[in-house]
Image: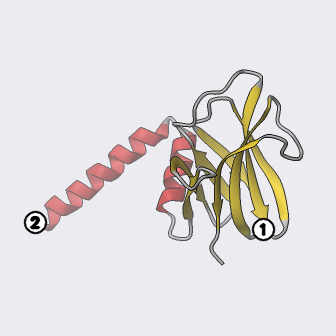
């Protein structure tokens, strides 16, 4: 029986390695999702409605945004990811007009995330509309 269990675990591990071997981004995301010190958060629409936008953030500050169902916006617009560290709101990534999986890195104690709709190329200070947000409970 032990041999069967070990064989099954080994088969799953080999299959996972094969699936991510050609895609280093997917391998990095999988590693973050499996790390015990990673944090996964779900962003909400400004009215509090649920979205599918999620962020996984590792202890090192490396993170990925998953936002597969954000509606595509025109080519002259872009989604932009913001992080809140202390009292500062910092641009973490310009995501494009149809983001799916987007990497970013942040330094410091993150207390919130926001996604806004901005002009193409991004902005240093948000001028657009809020699309999704998450804030750490006090």
Neighbour class for label 2 at 10 Å: few (<14), some, many (≥20)? few
Q: Quadrant of the C terminus?
A: bottom right
Q: Which mark is residue 108?
A: 1
Residue 34, horizontal then vertical, whole percent: 47, 61
Identify the residue shown where x is 40% and y is 40%. Answer: 18
Q: Nearer the viewer, residue 28 or 5?
A: 28
- Report the residue that reaches farthest toward the bottom: 138
Q: CA distance from mark 2 to mark 1?
A: 48 Å
Task: Tell me which corner region of the image, top left, top right, bottom left or bottom right, holds residue 7.
Answer: bottom left
**Drawn side of residue 59 relative to residue 51, left or right:** right
Identify the residue shown where x is 64% and y is 42%. Answer: 102
Identify the residue shown where x is 51% and y is 64%. Answer: 35
Res. 106 in view: no
Neighbour class for label 1 at 10 Å: few (<14), some, many (≥20)? few
Closer mark to the observer between disc 2 and disc 1: 1
Q: Nearer the viewer, residue 133 or 96?
A: 133
């Amino acid at each position: 029986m032990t041999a069967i269990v070990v064989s099954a675990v080994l088969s799953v591990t080999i299959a996972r390695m094969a699936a991510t071997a050609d895609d280093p981004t997917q391998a990095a995301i999988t590693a973050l999702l499996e790390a015990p010190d990673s944090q996964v958060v779900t962003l909400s629409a400004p009215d509090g409605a649920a979205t599918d936008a999620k962020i996984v953030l590792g202890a090192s500050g490396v993170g990925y945004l998953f936002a597969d169902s954000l509606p595509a916006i025109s080519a002259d617009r872009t989604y932009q990811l913001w992080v809140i560290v202390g009292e500062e709101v910092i641009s973490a990534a310009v995501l494009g007009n149809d983001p799916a999986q987007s990497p970013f890195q942040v330094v410091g104690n993150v207390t919130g995330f926001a996604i806004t709709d901005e002009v193409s190329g991004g902005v240093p200070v948000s001028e657009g509309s809020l699309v999704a947000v998450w804030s750490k409970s006090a």
